[in-house]
Image (spheres, rainbow, N blue to C red):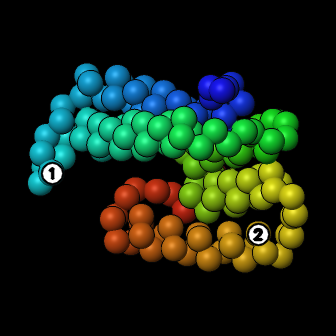
Amino acid sequence: MGVKLRNNKDVLAGLLFILIGGFALFIAGDYQMGSAMRMGPGYFPTVLGGMLCLFGAVLTLRGFLTGEKVSGEWGWKPVALLTSSLVLFGFIVTRLGLIPALAVLFFVSALAGREFRATEVLLLTAVMSVFAVGVFVVLLKMPFRLIGGF
């Protein structure tokens, strides 16, 4: 009977996780590792990449055992909108500040879904902006500009 790898959703997802985790491990290989108490710049990407590889291996194995097929077509619009929202966040956060970048991130990401409710997205943006400012600016004292011009 055999398992068709091309249409097996768990195998494809697992291989994607292994690929992303392997890429993180490859990139982090040049950075200093440090220890759990004094983390170097390579610690987090190495741990995260290793976890992604492990999770991907488990998911791939599950795909071989279950053989569940992919249904439907690729949703190119959601993929493009989610990718665009992350790129826009990175571009805007350094130029206009954290809060405008979060607003763009949430609104563009929400367009990728099946339903778009502006009121819900506005409420989510407000709550997450307060949370992000509280965690990153107040608690962690990261030097983010909240709202600012060029």
The Cα atoms of the two marked residues, 1 and 2, are separated by 37 Å
Seen at 81% across and 56% down, the residue is: 113
Vertical position of residue 50 compared to residue 139: above or below: above
Q: Considering the numbered disc 2 on the image, is that residue within a helix, a strand or a loop?
A: helix
Kindly identify the amino acid type of the residue bearing the numbered disc 2. Val
Dot 1 or dot 2: first in sequence order is 1
Seen at 33% across and 38% down, the residue is: 50
Q: Quadrant of residue 55?
A: top left
Please name whichever residue, 141 or 19, is drawn nearer the observer in this view of the structure: 19
Residue 121: assigned label = 2
Question: Residue 67's x, y, as percent?
Answer: 63, 39
Please name whichever residue, 136 or 150, is drawn nearer the observer in this view of the structure: 136
Which residue matches tag 1?
A: 36
| Residue 7 located left or right of residue 113 | left
Please name whichever residue, 17 or 125, is drawn nearer the observer in this view of the structure: 17
Question: Residue 120's x, y, as percent?
Answer: 78, 75
Q: Quadrant of residue 5?
A: top right
Evaluate whether residue 20 shows in this view.
no
